[in-house]
Image (spheres, helix red, strand yellow):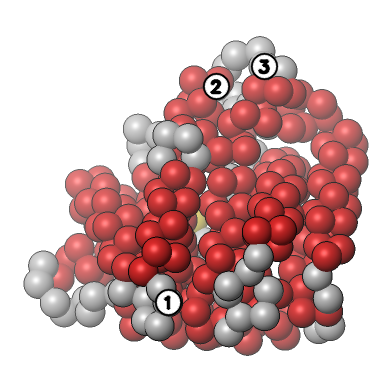
Amino acid sequence: MDLQKYLKDRGAIVNEALECHLPLAGDLPGVIHEAMRYSATDGGKRVRPILALAACEAVGGSYQSAMPAGCAIEFIHAFSLIHDDLPCMDDDDFRRGKLTSHKVYGEAIALLAGDALISLAFEVIAATPDVPALRLLEVSRLVARATGTRGMIGGQVLDMLAEGRDVELSDVEAIHRRKTGALLEVSAVVGGILGGGSKDQVDALSIYGKNIGLAFQVADDILDLTGDSEKLGKSTGSDLRQKKATYPSVIGIERSKSLGEKAVSDAIEALSIFDENADPLRAIARFIIERDV
């Protein structure tokens, strides 16, 4: 399949849906809505919502069923980036090739824009049309768990606590299974649930999601050392400067590459119970480890 065309087409559909769910910049209080839009609509690969749509179709569902949840997860991802860039966290000036939110709107509005995006996320999930309420309840529970202290936020805390410390591979895995992996895994899982997938199918999507989460972080860690900052849209070398716990810092670049490649192989193997409807998921797994952005 032509993955680049698939990602472009699906990304455009996702962007339209994000626009529909976000408050208009002119609605009071305008500055917070403008700040939300600034971080949620401009740039980004839309990997998480696209995963949700692809997983929904892999189990035989219609991608429209997973679109609200996919948008919600993208709003949560945008919230995490806004907060991650704040001076009290990673203190970054650029994201996706433009100034970070706090550089444009100030720290207080940036903080509140992130808070507002996470609130909007659950509003959007709850309003999903034509999906049984119990299914939406389970999706909300899983997304909340993947966002909170047992997921992304917990991973961010572990990441900060590990700065400047000597860490083991198990420590790095514990950080990024939560910080990066949780939202990627839940994207695939909720797509399967919303598409009406069986328990075996959803379990397979969970294994797939765990593995692409690992591969995604390995690729990110390597790109921070070897990537082109202009292509990435953000400064490179920040992990090294901040003495972050990364895969290359613990096991080196070559072993990190091998770890990422094995994770992709395991992700694709997990999809063996699916037919060609899961080909986009297979292609996305390969893209994650081969990407240069």
- The crowding category of the residue bearing disc 2, from other C-alpha atoms within 10 Å (few below 14, some 14 to 19, many at least 20), is some
Q: For marks 3 and 2, give the CA distance.
A: 9 Å
Q: For the C terminus, give its image quadrant.
A: bottom right
Q: Which of marks 2 and 1 is in front?
A: 1
Percent of width and height locating residue 149: 42, 34
Q: How far apart are marks 1 and 3 (CA)?
A: 44 Å
Front one among 184 and 97: 184
Secondary structure at badge 1 equals loop
Q: Quadrant of residue 241?
A: top right
Q: Residue furthest left?
A: 28
Element type where label 2 sits in the image: loop
Residue type at mark 3?
Answer: Val
Q: Is residue 275 left or right of residue 229?
A: right
Q: Name the residue under label 1.
A: 131
Crowding near the residue tagged with mark 1, few <14, some 14–19, many ≥20 C-alpha atoms within 10 Å? some
Q: What residue type is labelled 1?
A: Val
Q: Earlier in the sequence, mark 2 or mark 1?
A: 1
Local secondary structure at mark 3: loop
Q: Mark 3 points at which residue?
A: 167
User: Where's residue 18, x and y in %?
Assistant: 40, 76
Q: How crowded is mark 3: few (under 14 residues within 10 Å), some or many (20 or more)?
A: some
Q: In terms of image quadrants, where is residue 272?
A: bottom right
